[in-house]
Amino acid sequence: MKKALVIFKNGDNLDLIIESCLSLKKEFGFEITPVYALNVNLFINNSEDAANLLEDFSEIQDDFLDKTKEKLIEHKLNAHLLTIVQVTTENLKNFLRLNDILIYQEEFYLGDLFLEILKTIYRPIIVLRGKPLNFKNISVASDDGIKINKSVYSFLSLFSTTDIEKLDVFTWNYSKDEHTLLELIHEKGILPNLRGFSSPLDDVKDFYFELNKSSLVIMGNLSHSFFLERITNRMGLNLLEHVNAPIFIG
């Protein structure tokens, strides 16, 4: 059985996360591993005190945690597995050894922990944004690099039972005649539909507007090229800052 590690953080859209978990469970049989992210640094910085705080967490009144437990119980999403932990990339690596994918909600403002996850975590990630996860209208944002090819391959392997007939492949300012990703998609029995946008003929706002019609967007992993992406204004970071649909990063 495939497993999804799902992070719950105080202030997240709880209903959106729960609905996304139900989609993974009902459509693909994923077992949900829920983790409540306690931001110990909000209270204290001393590591010994942090450990004590984790042990005595029941004494801390946290409405969001209570609501999370209630929702997990209501929808039979392994509430008994709920772990309370200070989330760091090292902790996530340990959890992900027994899970196939990470589910993490992050808004357009990209926090330090999320950016560190992108650089260091090598399991697939689904980033939840403004709408719950579903698989009805899947798109790919591509520059035909090796990372997007790996993400598409990872997605099709992880969700092999997905009934996909066509994939829209969005590009921005990409003029290469040969697009090898299209061949990869076609070999999987899926019809690729290349949707090329470029300046000055198109406005980048139109590119994002069309991409945001998707129910899920597949993009390549930034990993250690994060700073290069920022400096060169590459599309990867711009996607994370403008796409309102869930994003799969393989």
Image (tube, rainbow, N blue to C red):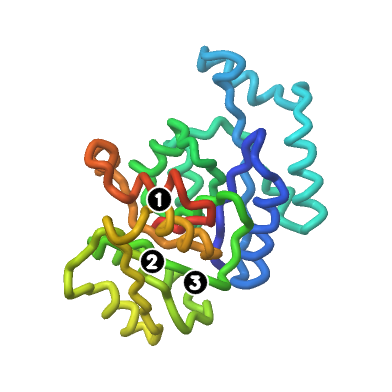
Q: Eyeballing the image, is 149 above or below 58?
A: below
Estimate the spatial distance between the alpha carbons at disc 1 and disc 3, rounded to whole Å. Answer: 22 Å
In the image, 173 versus 132, the foreground residue is 173
Query: Residues under labels 2 and 1: Cα distance?
Result: 19 Å
Q: For the residue carrying disc 3, how many other residues have a C-alpha within 10 Å: few (<14), some (14-19), or many (20+)?
A: some
| Quarter that holds the C terminus | bottom left
Q: Residue at x 37, y 53 (%)?
A: 204
Residue 178 place in picture, x, y as percent: 18, 75
Does residue 172 appear to the left or right of 13 in the view shown?
Answer: left
Crowdedness near tag 2: few (<14), some (14–19) or many (≥20) residues, C-alpha within 10 Å: some
In the rendered image, the vertical position of residue 179 relative to residue 126, given as above or below: below
Identity of the residue drawn at 52% across and 79% down: 161
Comes first in the chain, label 2 or label 3: 2
Residue beneath label 2, please? 154
The disc, 1 or 3, on the residue closer to the chain's N-terminal end is 3
Disc 1 residue type? Leu
Q: Residue at x 41, y 41 (%)?
A: 117
- How many C-alpha atoms fall within 10 Å of the one at disc 1: few (<14), some, or many (≥20)? some
Residue type beneath disc 3:
Phe
| Amino acid type at mark 2 | Ser
| Quadrant of the image containing the N terminus | bottom right
Q: Quadrant of residue 41?
A: top right
Q: SS of the residue at dot 3?
A: loop
In this view, which residue lies farthest toward the bottom?
A: 189
- Residue 98 appearing in the image: no
Q: Name the residue tied to disc 3.
A: 159
Q: Which residue is mark 1?
A: 239
Q: Secondary structure at mark 2?
A: helix
Could you tell me which secondary element the residue under label 1 belongs to?
Answer: helix
